[in-house]
Amino acid sequence: MTQFADEVLREYSLYVDVSDVNFFHSKLDISATGNEQDLVVLPCHLGERVCDQCSVDALDESFLIYMVIMEEFGVRIPFTAFGMDVLKFLNVASSQIRPNRWAFIRGFEILCKALHLEPSVGVFFHFYGLRMFTRISISAHPGNKLFPPYASNFKKEWRDSFARIQGAPECSTASVLVEGKPKFPLRWTYAPLAVMGYDFNRMTPYERCMVCFLEKCGPP
């Protein structure tokens, strides 16, 4: 794990008590299904780090997530199809992306919804890329910005504010699994995909038209 940032290796979760995670869940709706009973928020083990590769059962759908991305950006579980596609394309767990970089993902979704467009990975990575550092950093390509970045200084510390989430046992809709396989990486990976752009020729006709439309509507 030497390739992970020191700040990640030094931070342990504050959510190690059932009462703490229950309080968090009681004050915030986090289920995308509209039924909070579909999800279970679990405390972390004492001394657990967000990048730890714990041994899990093949059908274990639990994963660690920073609470702030749900509080600040309205991310809900299960993630949207677009959100899961981004994580799968990049080969990263949700917590490998810095919370303020989740703002780009959510902002793109909200923009597309407002314009009645279907968000896609190809179009998103035409405007944004992933740089390979010890921390995953999504940023706009030079001169190709759709909206300004979210402020990097949150009102409260977020690095130790992560907990474990999974679908409730009685929930018929799996949060992260399809036919027993994860829809995106559930644990931190050692081989994220560096993305410097997306081949325009690989896009569908709809995606090409969408790129042209957004480039005309984007900021000057």
Image: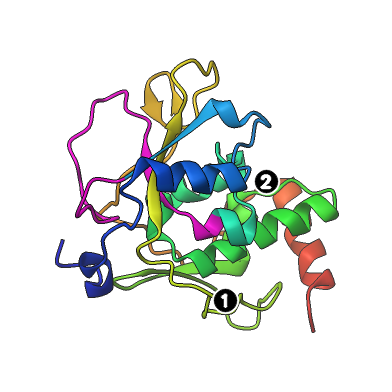
Residue 169's label in the rendered image is none
- Find the residue positioned furthest to the left: 2
Residue that badge 2 annotates: 204
Per the rendered image, the range of residues in magenta is: 44-69
Position of residue 106 relative to residue 11, above or below, is above
Taking 206 as reference, is 8 above or below it? below
Q: Is residue 168 left or right of residue 58?
A: right
Camera sees residue 197: no
Q: Amino acid at mark 1?
A: His
Q: Is residue 61 magenta?
A: yes
* Residue denoted by label 1: 141
Along the viewing direction, whichever of 2 and 21 lies nearer the viewer: 21
Q: For the residue carrying disc 1, how many other residues have a C-alpha within 10 Å: few (<14), some (14-19), or many (20+)?
A: some
Q: What residue sits 79% from the left and 50% below the top? A: 113
Q: Position of residue 25 (x, y in %)?
A: 53, 43
Report the residue that reaches farthest toward the front. 19
> Quadrant of the rendered structure where residue 201 is?
bottom right
The image quarter in which residue 212 lies: bottom right
**Considering only vertical position in the picture, is 132 above or below 63?**
below
Between 128 and 183, the one lying in front of the other is 183
Rendering coords of residue 149 (x, y %): 61, 77
Whether residue 150 sits left or right of residue 181 in the image: it is right
Q: Residues within 10 Å of mark 2 (few under 14, many from 20)?
A: few
Q: Find out whether residue 133 is within the magenta segment.
A: no
